[in-house]
Amino acid sequence: MAISTILVIEDDRFIGEMYVRSLKMAGYNVEWAVDGHDGLVMATNQHYDLILLDIMLPEM
């Protein structure tokens, strides 16, 4: 089975780093967008198995 790729969209640096570190330790490929605009661009240009999204992003 292929390793899943997860996109984390989180503007809080502490929380984003925690997600990335924890998911990588669990064996996932992880990419991180620090704002909603970058996350939207990444999500439309790449396939992700899962997207973890902060629902309170500024400017979105």
Image (cartoon, rainbow, N blue to C red):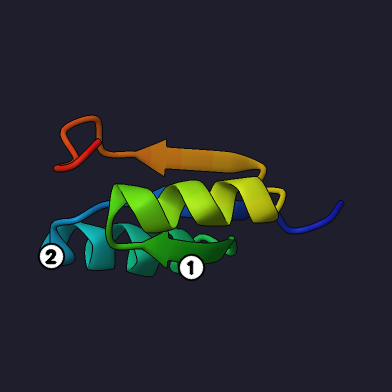
Query: Of the residues shown, which amino acid type is indicated by label 2?
Result: Phe
In this rendering, would 39 be left or right of 55? right
Task: Specify the farthest residue to the top.
Answer: 55
**Image coordinates for residue 50, horizontal then vertical, percent:** 57, 40
On the rendered image, what quadrant is the C terminus found in? top left
**Image coordinates for residue 37, horizontal then vertical, percent:** 36, 51
Query: Of the residues shown, which amino acid type is indicated by label 1?
Result: Lys
- Asked if residue 8 is positioned above or below residue 56 in the image, the reply reads below
- Asked if residue 33 is positioned above or below residue 10 in the image, the reply reads below
Q: Residue at x 25, y 68 (%)?
A: 17
The mark that comes first in sequence, 1 or 2, is 2
Is the residue marked by circle 1 packed among few (<14), some (14-19), or many (20+) residues within 10 Å? some
In this rendering, would 59 be left or right of 48? left
In this rendering, would 40 be left or right of 3? left
> What SS does tag 1 mark?
helix
Q: Residue at x 32, y 57 (%)?
A: 19
Q: Which residue is disc 1 drawn over?
A: 24
Q: Which residue is disc 2 drawn over?
A: 14
**Image coordinates for residue 1, horizontal then vertical, percent:** 87, 51
Q: Residue at x 35, y 69 (%)?
A: 21
Is the residue marked by circle 2 packed among few (<14), some (14-19), or many (20+) residues within 10 Å? few
- Asked if residue 1 is positioned above or below residue 14 in the image, the reply reads above
Total numbered labels: 2
